[in-house]
Image (tube, helix red, strand yellow):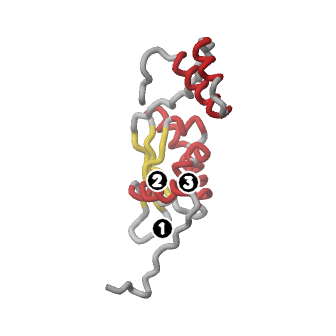
Amino acid sequence: MAKKPDSVAPERSRRARAVAELVPAIGGLAFKRFGFTQSALVARWEEIVGAQYARHSRPESLSFPRGKKDGGTLKVAVTGALAPMLKHVEPQVIERVNRLLGYAAVAKVMLRHADMEPPRRAAVPPAAVELSSETRSTLRDIADPDLRASLESLAQALSASNGPPVVR
């Protein structure tokens, strides 16, 4: 069976690709599924509405009238207490979203009340624990300095913990 001459296989390179190169393509499909053709709207939401509003709201979808790609409705999930305040700054939000996207994509904002998870706090690294002399003597025998540093860090983390590690 002969191959079709006009079908060209995509060119593959042998270089390793960074994960950051792959994520936009994969994430783009997920965003389109939820009505976002531009992932920048979700990624830069805090920049659009500000830190205070971003903590209590998130964009859900962007829908357009049939056959058009402008004059759409941006649906935003917001906590109950912040909804009236966000309604007052709606013109600024529309203007900033349209500036970000580069055209008049949004004509109105529709708010939906939702519960927001509180922002996660950054994990505080455990305090450095003094290693036992037995552990230090076993680490001293390792010739590779990078491996020794990694194993020492692991030993400190394990000695600082209580019980088995918790996987989240």
Name the residue beneath numbered marker 1.
69
User: Is 35 on the left-hand or right-hand side of 156?
Assistant: left
Q: Position of residue 135 (x, y in %)?
A: 58, 17
Q: Secondary structure at mark 1?
A: loop
Question: Three-letter amino acid code at disc 2?
Answer: Leu
- Residue for point 47% across, 38% down: 83
**Cα distance between the residues tagged 1 and 2:** 13 Å
Q: Secondary structure at mark 2?
A: strand
Quadrant into which the N terminus falls: bottom left
Question: Three-letter amino acid code at disc 1?
Answer: Lys
Q: Secondary structure at mark 3?
A: helix
**Cα distance between the residues tagged 2 and 3:** 14 Å
- Residue for point 55% across, 38% down: 53
Q: Position of residue 30 (x, y in %)?
A: 42, 55
Crowding near pointer 2: few (<14 within 10 Å), some, many (20+)? many
In this view, 143 is above or below 74: above
Q: Upstream in the sequence, badge 2 or badge 3?
A: 3
The residue lying toward the viewer, choosing from 89 and 160, is: 160
Quadrant of the rendered structure where residue 143 is? top right
Name the residue beneath numbered marker 3.
40
Q: Upstream in the sequence, badge 1 or badge 3?
A: 3
The residue lying toward the viewer, choosing from 144 and 42, is: 144
Quadrant into which the C terminus falls: top left
User: Is 145 on the left-hand or right-hand side of 85?
Assistant: right
Name the residue beneath numbered marker 2.
74
The residue lying toward the viewer, choosing from 80 and 160, is: 160
The residue lying toward the viewer, choosing from 42 and 5, is: 5
Nearer to us of marks 2 and 3 is: 3
- Outermost left residue: 1
- Residue for point 40% across, 43% down: 112
Q: Upstream in the sequence, badge 1 or badge 2?
A: 1
